[in-house]
Amino acid sequence: MKKLFFLMTLCLFAVGVGAQNGKRGLYSVAFYNLENLFDTIHDAGKNDYDFLPGGSYKWTSQKYEAKLANMARVLSSLSRDEVPQGPAFIGVAEVENDRVLTDLLEQPSLSHYKFIHYEGPDKRGIDCALLYDPQQYEVTASRLVLSEPYQGDTVHLTRGFLIVDGRMAGERVCVIVNHWPSRGAKSPVRVHAARQVRALADSLQRSDRRLKLIVMGDMNDDPMDESMQTLGARKYKKEVKKADFYNPWWETLQDDGVGTLLYRGKWNLFDQIVLSKPFLKKRRGLRYDHHEVFRRDYLIQQDGKYKGSPLRTHGGRTWLNGYSDHLPTIIYLKK
């Protein structure tokens, strides 16, 4: 009898969890640049020496554990006030290897997530990855597409394009996770990255014209910059043509003055999530609802020289026990 009661309770709990999305019809996806999530162990062939106990950041096990806890605090809080389960998936940038991702997901608040990661050729060893909740997003395929250098420039290479295909809310949803070259490179290098992503997107959309495709990442450019226009990311829904993307972050930055990182007193919004046209249908299937720059007081420097900026891990070489120099972004989808 006790066993039967336990099974009935378990079933009711499972139904209740599944109904939490259905009741409000909301799902979420997110992106976060984790800013140098390195472990304390040297990876052969990688220039990770700054993040070793004897390196310039004196990166000890204690600091690494604190970084993991801080990242887990943020990631486990994303969208929870509107979607109790949290994001179906979260694209992340600046992760060193499988080991740091394993350690991250061993944090109790993230234990329900799994990850997809491929080791890329970045000289420092930082890659993109996808964290996903298998209860909300069923992965069916994944691959890493290496970028082609711009005019032979191997210094400012784009990290590989991580493509993950799966099913969410009963529909096919594909995502491409990006980390384009930094502002140390000139604009044409990021435009070149955008052309490569556009080619990948065109190929995916040709094979499935109804494909719901998400492109997310740290683009190191703002929504109105040339690279994002090359990608086909438009400010207004009415401007989105068949193979284009809707970019709600353009209005967020240009009209509302809200960004994800602060540089010399000016907000930028490099951390973008753009959506293919099928997400803009008004009535059928998963569709865009709203978006958010995840800004909380604890993520912001409260005093000193960098007051008002995202509270990062280090200020110069001084350990601040912060989070990241970027703020996360979230897209909410309705069904």
Image: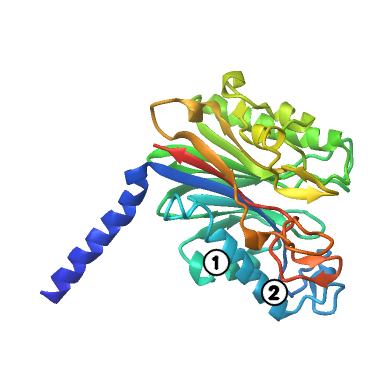
Provide the secondary structure element on which disc 1 rests. Answer: helix
Q: Among all residues in the image, which is located at the extreme left? A: 1
Residue drawn 82% across the image and 65% down it: 315
Disc 1: which residue: 105
Q: Is residue 255 left or right of residue 241?
A: right
Instruction: For marks 1 and 2, give the CA distance.
Output: 14 Å
Relative depth, front residue between 225 and 88 = 225
Residue 222, percent across and down?
75, 37
Label 2 environment density (alpha carbons within 10 Å; few <14, some 14–19, many ≥20): some
Q: Is residue 155 above or below residue 281?
A: below
Seen as rendered, the residue at the extreme front is 303
| Residue at (75% x, 79% y) in the render | 60
Location of the C terminus by quadrant is top left
Q: Position of residue 251 (x, y in %)?
A: 65, 32
Residue 16: image quadrant is bottom left
Q: Is residue 114 left or right of residue 121?
A: left
> How many other residues sit within 10 Å of disc 1, few (<14), some (14-19) or many (≥20)?
some
Q: Which residue is mark 2?
A: 64
Q: Which mark is residue 176?
A: none
Q: Residue at x 83, y 48 (%)?
A: 265
